[in-house]
Structures are given as structure tokens and as C-alpha cells.
Image: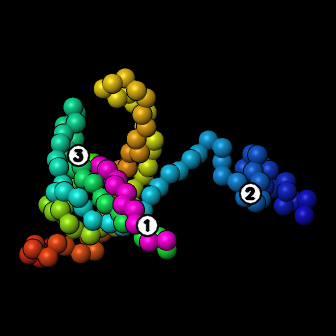
Amino acid sequence: MSALRALRSASIPNARGFSTSAPRSFGIAKMNILGNLTNDVELTSTNSGLTVAKYSVAVDVRAKSGNDNTSFFRVSAFEPTDYVKNLKKGTQVFVEADAAMKKYETKEGHPAVALDLVQRRLTVLRRPRNEEPTEE
């Protein structure tokens, strides 16, 4: 047993055999969203020339009490594929995104907070009824 400890401490300094906690310097914030696009995808460019697709997803939450609630999430996709660029309002999507809180000041000078989502993966679940399917 002591030989195993010696080998472990020699090969990996400060190593622990088992840990239930994440490293302190590392954090992760991800969100999965299932909902419908509220508008067609909007394309913009950054100052450095990167193409950014921006869109909003509406998520309906049905409570047992009968009170329905809709949440809206703004999502950005950097260097999107043509597939993402051509999505239309009403498309049902599943989005996997990285999330970050952003503090800013409103035009009136009041502090505000926004949730920024950056798309990592997008799956189209259903296209709007009035849209013809495309072959890809």
C-alpha cells in the first residue's frame, strides 16, 4: 500500500485518489432549451469580421396550478452554418448553450443584468407548417 502512495505522489504532485468537489478555478454554466424560435434568425458581424447569428427561443412552462408561463431566451451562434442561418420563426429547436451573466447599464443609467447564451449545438425538432422541408 505504501508503494502505491509513493508512486502516486511521485507521478502526480498534490494528487488525490478521489474527490467529490470540482477544482476551485474551474466553473461551467450550460443550459438546454427546448422551444420555438420567436423570429427568423438575424445575421450580424463583429468588428473582426466574424458572422454571428442571433435568435430568440420561447419556452412555455405549464404549471399544475394552471398558471402558464413563457420565458424568452436570446441565443448567439458564432460562425453559424447555412442550416442555422436559414431557420424561420416557429421552428421548434433544442439548443445546448454556454451561459453567462452580463452586467450592463440601461439608457436611463440603471444597473441591469442579462443572461447571455452562446449556442454550442442545435437540433431542429419540427419546422413550421407553412415551410417546405429542405434536403440536406
Q: Is residue 107 visible?
A: yes
Instruction: Say whether residue 75 is magenta.
Output: yes
Which residue is disc 3 drawn over? Answer: 52
What's under tag 3, amino acid-wise?
Answer: Val
Q: Is residue 87 visible?
A: no
Instruction: Say whether residue 14 is magenta.
Output: no
Q: Nearer the viewer, residue 6 or 113?
A: 113
Which residue is disc 1 drawn over? Answer: 67
Residue drawn 43% across the image and 67% down it:
67
Give the x, y percent position of residue 104. 39, 30
Q: Secondary structure at mark 2?
A: loop
Magenta region: which residues?
Answer: 65-76
Q: Is 40 left or right of 70, judged from the image as shown?
A: left
Q: Is 67 left or right of 53, judged from the image as shown?
A: right
Q: Residues within 10 Å of mark 3 (few under 14, many from 20)?
A: some
Mark 3 or 2: in front is 3
Q: Is residue 121 above or below residue 55?
A: below
Q: Is residue 43 above or below residue 68?
A: above
Q: Nearer the viewer, residue 106 or 19?
A: 106
